[in-house]
Amino acid sequence: MMKKIPQEFLKRFDAQLIKNSVPSKKHSFCRKWLRYYIDFCFKYGHGSKKLDSLPLFINKLREKKQSRQQQKQAYDSILIYYSMFDIFPDWPQNSWSDNRTKKEASGVREEKTNYNAGEDSVTGVWQSVYTRLSDEIKVRHYSPKTLKAYSMWVRKFQGFVEGKVLSRLSTDDVKRFLTYLAVEQKCSASAQNQAFNALLFFFRNILKKEFGKIDGVVRAKRKPYIPVVLSRQEINLIIGKLRYPYNLIVKLLYGCGLRLSECMTVRMNNLNFDAHTLTIHDGKGKKDRSLPLPKMIIPDLLAQVDVVKKMHLQDLDDSFSGVFMFDSMEKKSKYIAREFNWQWLFPARELTYVSETKEYRRAHLHNRHVQKAIKSVVNRAQLTKRATAHTFRHSFASHLLQENYDIRTIQQMLGHSDVRTTMIYTHTVPSQTKKELKSPLDF
């Protein structure tokens, strides 16, 4: 949710717009950019009254593919905001007045030149950091989500150190940032740990510096977490209320213990109906694993395969370019994306237009559609538990544990690297051990 600005402050801002001869038809745009700027500073930990925050904000707009005209409009709006506090940058300000003198017009031309110069002086050196960060993560075949998270934390760190020169960054800056997250931002332990890992990667692989020992950092307190587990009756209730194809998706989530991203990226060649197995390729951590297919949903899966066959034939008639592929698969075979065995099990309803190549591709069903469908049903069912798509994976593991399955077997089925991750499900199952102490001889 966007941070709200008090109405009294907006009235003062409107008065400042009038003072700066901003045409009334442009006031709404100025207020919009001010809201975006304040929200940006709040979200990323920048000072809204610091000049260094403006170039960072403009850089964010550029990443969001905002036009040059919109960037300029936002830039001029924030300069007026600065003038409310008698803050003036070293570079000239723009005049909104339509009745400018020749001298003012030349000042605008000078501002256009200095606009880039002032921005580059703050963010130019840092700009290459994000390109190198992206390259380093892609070389290691990390998840796109990892790139997104690490880039976010590095950007927040950049704002915290106010665009400090890269060569002067030290471990002390990291300590202050992590302490700031815990004390002032009151972030969770997992968020602080993610920030730590992002900056560790940033220092080692981008700055080519060793992190050193991190002492004296206030750490966010990690709370003991017990996963939410649904009963079999509650799961059946949710499945019964879900429409196609979401009911089949939930059956797979619970029946195979899949992550939502794994379920959405299942292709035809992942299914082996002869052996009753489902193979997950490139799961979390780029790990593969095989899982038994629940026998009761095989008829539903076969029906879904028929639906995909009909859709695929229609796509071929419409001369589509195939499904989205991963890495460099299409370089190995030109038509592999059009082959049936690479089609999604849960394809999106509409084709996606790729502007770069001017072609239509078929994506898989978006995660958010599934999440919204589950949330809607859970609310309508008035369950007392907070259930999400991941809750079915928790329920899968807990119900196996209740049936006395070995913890190592459950670990392999979930795809966990460490059994300690799987051990959390021991807290979701009531203990059935006998409390009375006895010698084995007395059994």
Image (cartoon, rainbow, N blue to C red):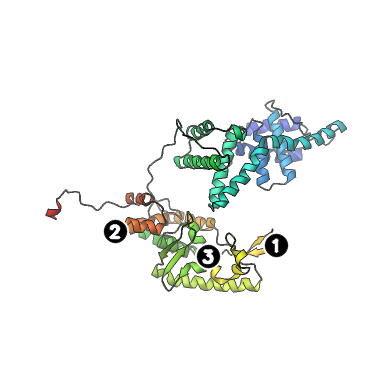
The residue lying at 70 percent from left, 39 percent from top is: 74
Residue pointed to by mark 1: 358
Q: In which quarter of the image is residue 218?
A: top left
| Crowdedness near tag 2: few (<14), some (14–19) or many (≥20) residues, C-alpha within 10 Å | few
Q: Quadrant of the C terminus?
A: bottom left
Q: In this view, does 105 lie to the left or right of 161?
A: right
What x and y, as percent, mark residue 277?
A: 42, 68
Q: Residue lying farthest right? A: 102
Q: What element carries label 2?
A: loop
| Crowdedness near tag 1: few (<14), some (14–19) or many (≥20) residues, C-alpha within 10 Å | few
Viewer-nearest of discs 3 and 1? 1
CB atoms at circles 2 and 1 under 8 Å apart?
no
Instruction: Name which residue type carries label 3.
Output: Phe
- Which of these two is toward me, 121 or 240? 121
Instruction: Name which residue type carries label 2.
Output: Asn
Residue pointed to by mark 2: 404
Residue pointed to by mark 3: 346
Kindly report the distance in space between the C-alpha atoms of the residues bearing marks 2 and 1: 54 Å
CB atoms at circles 3 and 1 under 8 Å apart?
no
Q: Earlier in the sequence, mark 2 or mark 1?
A: 1
Kindly report the distance in space between the C-alpha atoms of the residues bearing marks 3 and 1: 24 Å
Q: In which quarter of the image is residue 128?
A: top right
Q: Is mark 3 on a helix, strand or loop?
A: loop
Residue 14 can be seen, yes or no: no
Residue 88 can be seen, yes or no: yes
User: In this rendering, is residue 299 above or below 253?
Assistant: below
